[in-house]
């Protein structure tokens, strides 16, 4: 199958690749770049596990073709903190036990980052509405909401 | 909780490691995308499988044309039943139950298909895209067979799903105590109904995925996979491929949720292993969501006719139930088809004092995906039915439903109490759970507010559900009724290596429960080291000689018990070694935070120094003493019977009179989960369980048409609750140590899902109590409610 040249920045690093037009961004990140932190849970855009930031906005990487990202800047969970130096949002998730199996967690974090950057998140209803495109089967969402509420309240300096 | 601070010591009691809110060691890797789930694993030269699956519910295979697929780009081969059957020996889920008929285990369909999604052919190609392209080119010629999807019709055996069984009735059982008919006939009051709880699916967010690697030089097979049961799977695959355990290893790396869905033997597991051996290359299958919704084990799907007799004071006299369980197309390995439906009748009497009971169950095969273990197994259904009957009785008596429960829940002085189905409840806080839940909910006040809201025309309801379950089940009882596989023991090996590091190895497999943290807490406390000093190995069949895995709320009780036994034995060895090194009596040796010292002196040695002395500084401990010592200990724990876990849930709901959507406004749970290892993790288990139970009550339903065609093949159609549908959940823990288990632990991973469907159903019924409507079918979707409330439209 024909391949197309693309160039994009992922977590601040520039990548030039040739990809099939049908290659999903999720597969491109996981298979071609080895960034397996982005998870794939449904491949039809409902569960939100594959959420990444595409030019600053949350996007489903399972519904995005890699060729659409030519020239774009992508941020994945690997672009937040590292195991020894967690991002404040990751710290809050850990403190509040906002993850269990961890499979939905990268998508939850990227969605929460987007919400924290754009919305007041003044009420739990607003947080829950913002998270309603990301499914979690383990936590019952209670501690995810707690973690985001605390991070939202501490906002002001830099959470992004 | 009392901690094991030695009596008479002057210092203040040290907070225990067991019972502390220790942050999870799993989190840093999972939060940063550095986890290692099966699909994240790369194997050099790996090829990919895609399955051609049946799009028919019940049909004979007249022919399979693989020619075009074989010619497709990147394809290494296309395989059908004969290819797999040539190398995989048959296996069946057997049972000791008399009225049970095992069905065959079918890796790839042999001659006929029995449900939509059943794998028919396996296509191997260089990558997943090419494998899926080619799988679409496999052409299967089907001759339709008559519909076999309706469980009640299937009982008539006019159409047989498994011809060799001679019937669709795969399992049947009856429990009876007392003269139920006579008591029912004499009873002043009886409530009865036909209940139905629709089929649901576990829907872990990680789909199933397997990677099989065959080392031809060593003739050794390794399967990495999304499984809760690596040891159980190893034993099954050893039988299927006739391999000894040292040439067959099953590893569950990070696993993205299970809930029972990843606890059985699957066709895809056998196929990837068979093809890895045949092709000499690593073979991977990454399932997608549609495959999960069609071919992962499903749950519930029962019709229950039930009847409760009681006297004018509300005392329960007799209970009777007749259950039809729609088990789907196959009796799943190893649990069998009796797993879910038989447990509905064994747990139906619940935590109540009921002298007379008769429960009859029939498990019937239909042309749908097989049912298997799902969080709660049988008990979400039994609790839904029993708790609805209790509320119906309360209404009949014009008595508060909380008061009726107080009158009938087994009281503290009545333990151990033997239920009508023969389950023995050890001491647990049945009444206490109810009392604490009512208090935390503010029951009287909320009832007053409900009355005021109803005055204003709002449809607000409050529902209670109490239940009891068996957890941490030992060898005396099988985790699945009649299953001849031991599920009652777990093993641990703990050793101190030459660097002084402590490693504890288990066969259980954590997939969200945080067992790497909680088991480290138990080992640290028992051994006398810091939590961070303990490395945990789990999820690997090579870790210990025998294990089945993580399911049935057993891992804290069983693996925790094995950890306790082996840590105590290892500690005794450390004390002996230290008595040589510190020249002190064994009785004077203490160990805390990884430092071994002599009581009342400043003589001490770190574990690292002790290990160096033991393993490399050969003159420090005499040869004879060294040879009689071992800085390694293994133990197997068997709770024998198991223990009781109990809880009461309360839900407050409001129904939107325009959309008929049900909003859960408040939710309180009080549960008796025994001695708590980590309260943060216990809360999380309750929250997640309740959310799944709310899903079962209001949203989640696997829907088939009359022919057995699946109508819910995506997450658009199969609705999993999101954050917007789940309320804040208040969980209280009674923390009463179990009298029956080592350490006093009780299992608590499933309870949330057991109580929630019943509590929400009772709350919905309460909200509609002014109308002549029965809530006897779950989920109560907006459509179902609309049809109940407006039958005229």
Image (tube, rainbow, N blue to C red):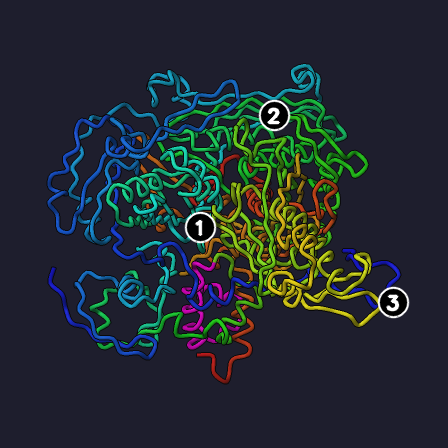
Pointer 1 and pointer 2 on the same chain: yes
Residue A51 locus on image (x, y percent): 36, 65
Mark 3 → mark 1, Cα distance in angstroms: 47 Å
Magenta range is A102-131
**Disc 1 crowd, CA 10 A, few/some/many (<14, 14-19, 20+):** many
Which residue does the numbered mark 2 point to in the structure image?
B307
Q: Are marks 3 and 1 on the same chain?
A: yes
Q: Mark 1 and 2 residues: CB-CB less than 8 Å, in contact?
A: no
- Residue B369 in the image: state x and y as whole percent: 37, 35
- SS for dot 1: loop
Residue A125 colored in magenta in the image: yes
Say which quadrant the C terminus of chain B sits in: top left
Task: Look at mark 1 in the image and give the residue it sits on.
Answer: B252
Q: Chain of mark 3?
A: B
The reply to whether residue B19 is in sight is: no
Q: Position of residue B100 (x, y in %)?
A: 47, 21
Residue under the image location 37 percent in, 26 percent down: B104
Secondary structure under tag 2 reads strand
Give the quarter of the image for residue B370.
Answer: top left
The chain letter for the residue carrying disc 1 is: B
Q: Is residue B210 magenta?
A: no
Front disc: 1 or 2: 1
- Measured as percent of width and height from the top left, residue B61 is found at 21, 28
Image quadrant where one finds the N terminus of chain B? bottom right
Q: Does the residue at mark 3 contact the one at mark 2 (Cβ under 8 Å)?
A: no
Residue indicated by mark 3: B10
Are dots 3 and 1 in contact, CB under 8 Å?
Answer: no
Determine whether the residue tagged by mark 3 lies in a helix, strand or loop.
loop
Q: Earlier in the sequence, mark 3 or mark 1?
A: 3
Quick check: B423 above or below A30?
A: above
């Amino acid at each position: 199958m024909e391949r197309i040249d693309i160039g994009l920045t992922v977590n601040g690093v520039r990548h030039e690749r040739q990809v099939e037009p049908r290659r999903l961004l999720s597969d491109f990140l996981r298979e071609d770049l080895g960034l397996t932190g982005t998870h794939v849970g449904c491949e039809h855009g409902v569960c939100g596990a594959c959420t990444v930031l595409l030019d600053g906005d949350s996007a489903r990487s399972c519904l995005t073709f890699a060729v659409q990202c030519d020239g774009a800047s992508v941020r994945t969970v690997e672009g937040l903190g590292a195991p020894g130096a967690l991002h404040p949002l990751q710290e809050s998730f850990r403190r509040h036990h906002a993850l269990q199996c961890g499979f939905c967690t990268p998508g939850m974090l990227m969605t929460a980052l987007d919400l924290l950057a754009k919305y007041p998140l003044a009420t739990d209803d607003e947080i829950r509405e913002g998270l309603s495109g990301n499914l979690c089967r383990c936590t019952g969402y209670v501690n995810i909401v707690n973690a985001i509420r605390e991070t939202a309240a501490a906002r002001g300096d830099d959470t992004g | 909780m009392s901690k094991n601070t030695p009596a008479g010591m002057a210092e203040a009691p040290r907070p225990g490691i067991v019972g502390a809110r220790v942050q999870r060691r799993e989190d840093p890797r999972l939060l940063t995308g550095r986890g290692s789930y099966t699909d994240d694993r790369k194997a050099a030269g790996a090829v990919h499988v895609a399955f051609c699956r049946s799009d028919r519910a019940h049909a004979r295979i007249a022919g399979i044309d693989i020619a075009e697929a074989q010619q497709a780009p990147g394809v290494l081969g296309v395989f059908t039943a004969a290819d797999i059957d040539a190398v995989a020996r048959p296996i069946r889920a057997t049972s000791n139950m008399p009225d049970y008929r095992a069905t065959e285990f079918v890796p790839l369909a042999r001659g006929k298909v029995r449900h939509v999604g059943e794998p028919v052919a396996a296509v191997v190609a260089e990558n997943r895209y090419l494998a899926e392209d080619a799988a679409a080119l496999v052409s299967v010629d089907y001759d339709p067979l008559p519909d076999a999807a309706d469980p009640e019709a299937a009982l008539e055996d006019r159409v047989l799903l498994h011809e060799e069984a001679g019937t669709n009735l795969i399992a049947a059982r009856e429990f009876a105590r007392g003269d139920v008919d006579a008591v029912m006939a004499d009873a002043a009051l009886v409530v009865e109904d036909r209940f139905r709880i629709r089929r649901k699916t576990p829907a872990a967010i990680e789909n199933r995925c397997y990677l099989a690697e065959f080392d031809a030089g060593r003739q050794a097979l390794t399967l990495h996979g999304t499984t809760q049961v690596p040891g159980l799977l190893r034993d099954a695959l050893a039988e299927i491929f006739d391999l000894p355990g040292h040439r067959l290893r099953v590893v569950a790396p990070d696993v993205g949720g299970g809930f029972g869905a990843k606890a059985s033997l699957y066709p895809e597991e056998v196929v990837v292993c068979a093809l890895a051996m045949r092709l000499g290359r690593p073979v991977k299958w990454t399932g997608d969501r549609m495959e999960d919704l069609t071919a992962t084990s499903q749950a519930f799907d029962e019709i229950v006719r039930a009847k409760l007799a009681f006297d004018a004071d509300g005392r329960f006299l007799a209970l009777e139930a007749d259950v039809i369980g729609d088990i789907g197309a196959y009796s799943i390995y190893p649990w069998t088809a009796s797993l879910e439906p038989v447990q509905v009748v064994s747990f139906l009497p619940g935590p109540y004092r009921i002298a007379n009971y008769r429960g009859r169950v029939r498990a019937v095969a239909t042309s749908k995906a097989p049912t298997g273990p799902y969080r709660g197994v049988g008990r979400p259904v039994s609790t839904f039915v029993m708790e609805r009957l209790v509320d119906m009785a309360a209404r009949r008596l014009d008595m508060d439903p909380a008061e009726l429960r107080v009158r009938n829940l087994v009281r503290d002085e009545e333990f151990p109490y033997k239920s009508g189905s023969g389950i023995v409840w050890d001491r647990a806080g049945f009444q206490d759970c109810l009392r604490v839940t009512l208090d935390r909910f503010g029951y009287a006040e909320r009832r007053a507010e409900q009355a005021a809201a109803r005055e204003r025309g709002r449809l607000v309801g409050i529902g209670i559900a109490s239940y009891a379950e068996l957890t941490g089940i030992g060898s005396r009882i099988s985790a699945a009724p009649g299953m001849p596989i031991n599920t009652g023991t777990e093993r641990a090996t703990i050793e101190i290596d030459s660097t002084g590091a402590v490693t504890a190895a288990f066969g259980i497999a954590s997939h969200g429960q945080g067992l790497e943290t909680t088991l480290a807490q138990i080992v640290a406390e028992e051994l006398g080291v810091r939590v961070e000093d303990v490395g945990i190995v789990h999820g690997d069949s090579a870790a210990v000689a025998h294990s089945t895995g993580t399911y049935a709320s057993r891992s804290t009780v069983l693996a925790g018990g094995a950890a306790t036994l082996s840590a105590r034995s290892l500690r005794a060895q450390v004390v002996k070694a230290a008595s040589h090194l510190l020249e002190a009596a064994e009785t004077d040796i203490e160990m805390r935070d990884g430092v071994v010292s002599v009581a009342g002196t400043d003589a001490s040695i770190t574990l690292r120094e002790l290990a160096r002395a033991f393993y490399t500084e050969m003159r420090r401990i005499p040869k004879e003493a060294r040879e009689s010592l071992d800085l390694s200990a293994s133990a197997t724990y068997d709770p024998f019977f198991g223990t009781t876990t109990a809880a009461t849930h309360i839900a407050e709901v409001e129904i939107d009179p325009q959309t008929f959507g049900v909003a859960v406004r408040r939710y309180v749970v009080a549960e008796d989960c025994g001695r708590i290892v980590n309260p943060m993790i216990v809360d999380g288990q309750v929250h997640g369980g309740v959310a799944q139970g709310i899903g079962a009550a209001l949203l989640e339903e696997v829907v088939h048409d009359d022919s057995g065609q699946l109508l819910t093949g995506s997450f658009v159609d199969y609705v999993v609750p999101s954050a917007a549908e789940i309320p804040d959940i208040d969980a209280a823990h009674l923390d009463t140590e179990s009298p029956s288990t080592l350490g006093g632990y009780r299992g608590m991973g499933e309870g949330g899902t057991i109580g929630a469907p019943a509590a929400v159903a009772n709350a919905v019924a309460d909200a509609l109590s002014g109308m002549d409507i029965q809530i006897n079918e779950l989920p109560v979707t907006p459509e179902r409610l609309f049809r109940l409330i407006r039958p005229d439209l």
